[in-house]
Amino acid sequence: MLHQHGIGLGLLATVRADGGPRVHPICPMLHDDRLYAFIVPGPKLDDLRRDRRYALHSETSPPPDHDDGFYVTGSVREVDDATLRQALTARVLDDRDLDELWPGFEHEVLFELEVDRCLLTVTRERDGLKAGHTTWRA
């Protein structure tokens, strides 16, 4: 569900310094059974560095699956691994059919989104999934 539009799309919720919620669109990526995201310098990066907790919700599908959704929560870990960054950067280029990255990409920070729990909601049985809610906890 995170990649139903060709690239990963989801809404990332972080915790502001005053304890309130903040929501941002991001492009998460699955790689070697782990969830990653490049985060642009700004409020969401500041939030994640201060408070590692996050929630990520996938965008919903158009009808007939418009109420389907995927939600994952956990904490982030900043990743400083040149080989992994190179592999995920190649994926960014490939997913978007680009020959070069946009200005400022080199300043984006790579995070692993460690998964504590998930909720999958499927409105009708499909793809081997039963209709209803399925939860998972680490």
Image: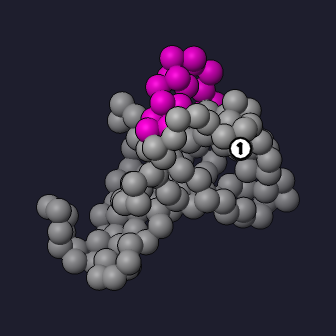
In the picture, the quarter occupied by the C terminus is top left
Image coords of residue 127 (percent x, y): 17, 62
> Which one is in front, 137 or 126?
126
Query: Residue 37, how many percent across, how many down?
Result: 56, 41
Q: Is residue 7 left or right of residue 45?
A: left
Camera-side residue of 42 and 49? 42
- Which segment is the magenta one? 76-94
- Answer with left or right where residue 30 lies relative to residue 14: left
The quarter of the picture where residue 85 lies is: top right
Whether residue 69 sits left or right of residue 80 in the image: it is: left
* Place of residue 19 in the rendered image (x, y in percent of width and height, measured from the top left): 79, 59
Residue lying farthest to the bottom in this orientation: 63
Q: Is residue 137 visible?
A: yes
Q: Which residue occupies 52% across, 23% down? A: 86
Q: Is residue 115 visible?
A: no
Q: Residue at x 57, y 19 (%)?
A: 81
Q: Residue at x 63, y 48 (%)?
A: 53
Q: Residue furthest left?
A: 128
Residue 36 rendering spot, x and y as whole percentages: 51, 39
